[in-house]
Every structure is written in C-alpha cells, then in structure tokens.
Amino acid sequence: TLSFEVLPIATECDKPKGKVKIELKMDAYNSNSKWAIQFITPNDYDNFKGDDGCFSTATSFNLKHAAEIINEELKKQKKTNAVVFYDPITLVESDDWDKYDANIELAQNEAKKLLLAQVDDFIKWLKTNNITIE
C-alpha cells in the first residue's frame, strides 16, 4: 500500500480545498523480485480530484499526470521497485453515428497500442539498466 498527501489535480471547477490523502493498494506484486505494478484507471483518478464542491456531467482525465505524481511519491518513499502504467484513454470520434461502433473499436485499438508502448518502454528501461525480474 502506498499512502501520501498531494494537492488535488485541477477539476472542472478548479477550486482545490487543501491536500487530498491518496491510498493505493498496488495492483500486482512479485515477492521474488520485490516489484510492484500500479495501473491508473479513471476510478483511481477520482481520488486525485478531492472534494471541490463541483458536479458536472462532463469530466476530463489526466491519468498520465496522476501516474507521474505516483511515480514521484514512490521515489520519495524509496520504493523504487515499482512501475506505474496508466490507461491512455483515447477519444471516440462520433460525428457519424452509423460508424460509432467502428469508431469505438478504433479508439480501443489505439488505447491498447499506447498502453503496450508504455510496457515496451518499461521493458527497454529494464534492459538498459541490466535489471532482471524473476
């Protein structure tokens, strides 16, 4: 579990009220190599917004920013055997409702490609630094 306090990520109202406490249970852990993995989803992101007293039916997500905050906190707490990935969330183009299902599939494929690029970058980083995970 990783616990820390941070200023909220800006929301639609952009009126943060003090720090928010974040508590994350890592999504995966390998006890042999002592590596942990955290995958940031829109549900995780809600923890970073805090209570701004604002409600909107439209929302935005900056999961990469949340992942960067977690990464910095892991470094501060000297929990370096951890990696943070984030859902890249891609936009579904919906100008033509007849093509909506196809556009959802395109967006999902793009998100998968972007997530795999994150994993590929991590694997390259491991190899560059001669780190093995058993």
Image (cartoon, rainbow, N blue to C red):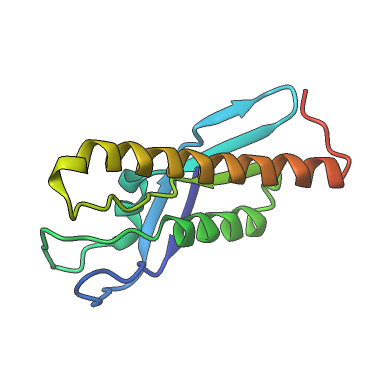
Q: Is residue 16 above or below residue 90?
A: below
- Answer with the quarter of the image where residue 7 lies: bottom left
90 left or right of 120? left
Residue 24 visible in the current orientation: no
**Residue ID at (35%, 67%):** 8
Residue 88, given in percent of the width and then of the height, sits at 44, 49
Q: Quadrant of the C terminus?
A: top right
**Residue ID at (54%, 60%):** 68
Residue 105, given in percent of the width and then of the height, sits at 33, 36
Residue 64 visible in the current orientation: yes
Q: Is residue 34 above or below residue 85?
A: above
Q: Is residue 43 above or below residue 70?
A: above
Residue 79, given in percent of the width and then of the height, sits at 67, 47
Total marks drawn? 0
Name of the residue lying farthest toward the right: 130
**Residue ID at (19%, 74%):** 13
110 left or right of 32? left
